[in-house]
Structures are given as structure tokens and as C-alpha cells.
Image (cartoon, rainbow, N blue to C red):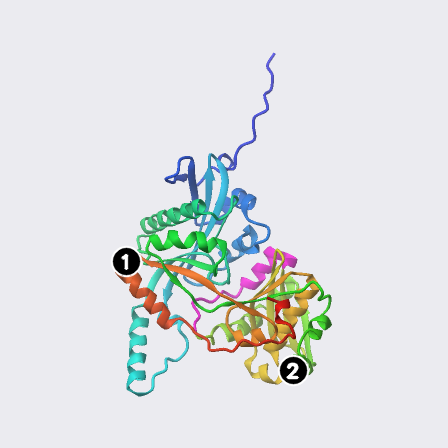
Amino acid sequence: MFCNKTKAPLSLLEQEEQPACSALVEAGLCFRLSRNISDLKVAWQSLAPKENKFLQYEYLQALEAHPPKGMGFCYLVFYRDKEAVGLAYYQTYYLDMQESVQKELQGEGLLGSLRKKLQQFFLRQAVFNVLICGNLSLTGEHGFYFKEGHGPKQLAWLQEATDRLQTELELSEQKKYQLQMFKDFALDGVTEQNLQPILQQEGYHRYRIQPGMYMRLPAHWDSFEDYLADMSSKYRVRAKRAAKKGKDLEWRALELEEILAQEKEIYALYRNISDNVDFNAYAFDEQYFSALKRELGEDMQLVACYLEGRLVAFYTAIFSGQTLEAHFLGLEHSLNRSHQLYLNILYALVRMGIYRGVEKIDFARTALEIKSSVGAVAQEFDCYLRHRNRLSSELMKLVFDHLSPKEDWTPRSPFKDMSIVE
């Protein structure tokens, strides 16, 4: 008589037959690489942190299906002794700074004219294939996750794997990647404290762009009226004036079928904004918002704004753990002043955040001063850049410092006690 022996369950490394696992220097450690997240689905879903929607399979699948022009993706899963222990997300992008800088370069007088010519020269030279650990379209740390935390050991694995990834890409695509970037680490956060010495030893330069704008929602805000009550009288009057100017606006959260039916109008409003910022490295395609709704369901809201039955604005919000992430929006510029469209969108996001009971709202970058006027506070982030040529890496820091969008702004303090949202 033969006994049926129950086999031990397969590890994630054994469940997924491809791609192959590439060994790292540390014994027992390897990583798997794919350009398609579906190849690593089982392992990725087992690892992706629930509190970060932007590292989860569904969001990344939607982005992969509808990428900005010129953008590709790479996904890495780290294994130690056949156990999945970490993941990393990369974007590849062809960056033409001359196309991305959309503001008119300024130059008055002799020195101003020379500065303008210098900017134009840098822009013509600044064309790169870039490998980014992180997400160009988001603010914050969305590039990797390790089960055991982000200590020096795990971050050394990440840096080693990133160099290996660049080599693999250059061999398979027969082109050079001039720049590597690790994107958006909270200033003085634990991850950056551990990562900074590793990257600087490898020739990366720290680089800072615009801050992200965040607002913590106090526990005692049970309604929008509670939010208004904590404001100083000046800003409370301002909020009520904006509501009065927007009294004829109708706001409605759209279901997937409604988004599909109005996709062209939604996209035109989105391009009204994306085509008129000082620096815009990319634009999503027309199906991006419907793809997000299809994959994320109730965790993605697209709220449309109508005036006399005509779509005049929209905003999107993604719920990621206990954070409401203000995503992309669009509006008719001609109606912005008369109906305070943008300011009313910011207030609507606050209202939504309170209603959904989140702990924090991420208002992302740009329009810093008006966001601070509704209660958002600046959070600085560091990026790290390295050019494949060490001398060029030094020059690149100067180029990016010189050309990156800067916004002169005055932080506002709308609350009687600003500490409640910091």
C-alpha cells in the first residue's frame, strides 16, 4: 500500500516560473525583473503594503496599460532563500528638457540676456534616457518596500539591483541610460538617513524641487463646519465667498460608465492644466482616468463639476491607506476667477477627506500658496541623481538646479492655531 504524502506548499519563487532570479552579492539573495507587472503578480500582491495604494498591483497595472508617451516600467522582487522580502518599482523615461520646460525664459539687460542664452544652451543639451526608482506623477516615497524595514542593508540591496537593472536595460534595448534617479524621500526621514550615505558614496547628488503640500485632519473635525470654525475670520470669510461664487456649480462623483461617456471632455480639461504649467515632463493618455476607476473602484473618485449642464471642471482623488491623495484635475480657465473653480476644488477635497475620515490629505506639488491658504503645509523631499559620467553628474546638478521650476510664494496660516494640521 502506498501512502499519499502531502507536499509542502510551493514558495513564491517556485510558483512563478519566470523570469529568472539574478543573484546579488549577499549569499542567498536574488531578484526577479520584469517589464510587465503581470509576470510577478503573485509575489507583488503578497508584498505590496496595504497603506500605499501606489505600490499595489491594481494601480500599477492601470498605469502600465495607459502610460505617458515615452515612459516604460520595470518591476523587481527581491528574494532571500526563496522567500519574497522586498519589491522595487521603476519608470524609464526619455526626458527632453526643452520640450518639458513650457514657461518662456526671461532675460532683461546684458546679464539677463546672457542668462537666457545659457538656459537655452542647457535646455538643448539636456536630453536623457532616465531610470527612476519612484513615480514621476506622484509626490512621496513610492519606489520600493521591504518587509524588514528600510535599513542600510535593504537599501544597499536596492542600489546594487538598480545598477544591475540599468545594465540589463542597456543590453536589451541597445541604448544608454544617462541618468539614474531615486525620487522623493521625506527630508530627515528614516529612509533618507539610511539611503543618503549609500547613494552619495556611489556618486549621486542630492537635489530638491518643489515641496509637497499636506494637511493633517484633526480628530475633532466631524464636518466641514468644524473645519471652518477653526479658521481665522479672514479665511472663513474667504471660504464663504468662494462658496457664494460657486453656488451655481453642480458637483457629482462619476461612475465608470459616466467617465467613459465624457472621456474626451474630461481629457480636454486635464490638458488645459497640464499644458500650461511651467514644467511638464509627461501627459497621460485619454483612457487613463477610466482605467484608474476600473482598477481601483471606490478607492478612486472622479468628481465632475457642471455649470448649466456643461462639464467645466473635474478633480480626482485616490484613497491610499489613511491618506486622501489629490490626483489630477482639469478646468476651464475662463471660468476660474468668476466661479473660483480651483479654490472650490481644494475646499471640496477637504470636505471629502473629512467625510471619509482620513488622517491626511496630500495636495501634491504646484500652486503652493493657494494650497497653504486652505490649510496645507509644505513638506520637503529630496531626490538623488547620478549621471553615468562622474564629471557630467556634477554638471547635471548645476543644470537641474538652474532649470528646475521654482515658485516664489508666501505660506499662509488660515487657522487660529496652525499646529492642529501640522
Label 2 to label 1, Cα distance in Å? 52 Å
Residue 200's spot in the image, x, y percent?
Answer: 36, 55
**10 Å neighbourhood of mark 2: few (<14), some, or many (≥20)?**
few
How many tags in the picture? 2
Q: Quadrant of residue 398?
A: bottom left
Work out whether residue 133 or residue 44 is closer to the camera in this orientation and state it.
133
Going 56% across and 28% down the picture, which residue do you hit? 8
Q: Secondary structure at mark 2?
A: helix
Work out whether residue 157 or residue 33 is closer to the camera in this orientation and state it.
157
Q: Amino acid at mark 1?
A: Arg
Residue 96's spot in the image, x, y percent?
Answer: 36, 67
Name the side, left or right, on which 73 lies relative to 369: left
Residue 228's spot in the image, x, y percent?
Answer: 69, 74
Q: Which residue is mark 2?
A: 234
Position of 171 relative to 272 (above/below):
above
Position of 251 relative to 88 (above/below):
below
Name the side, left or right, on which 127 lies relative to 351: left
Specify whether residue 288 is painted magenta: yes
Going 41% across and 78% down the picture, which residue do you hit? 103
Farthest residue, direction top = 1
Magenta region: 279-299
Please report contact status of discs 2 and 1: CB closer than 8 Å, yes or no.
no
Specify whether residue 130 is painted magenta: no
Which label was assigned to residue 161? Answer: none
Q: Which residue is mark 1?
A: 390
Position of 359 relative to 81 (above/below):
below
Residue 39's spot in the image, x, y percent?
Answer: 48, 44
Going 39% across and 38% down the picture, which residue do you hit? 26
Q: Secondary structure at mark 1?
A: helix
Q: Amino acid at mark 2?
A: Lys
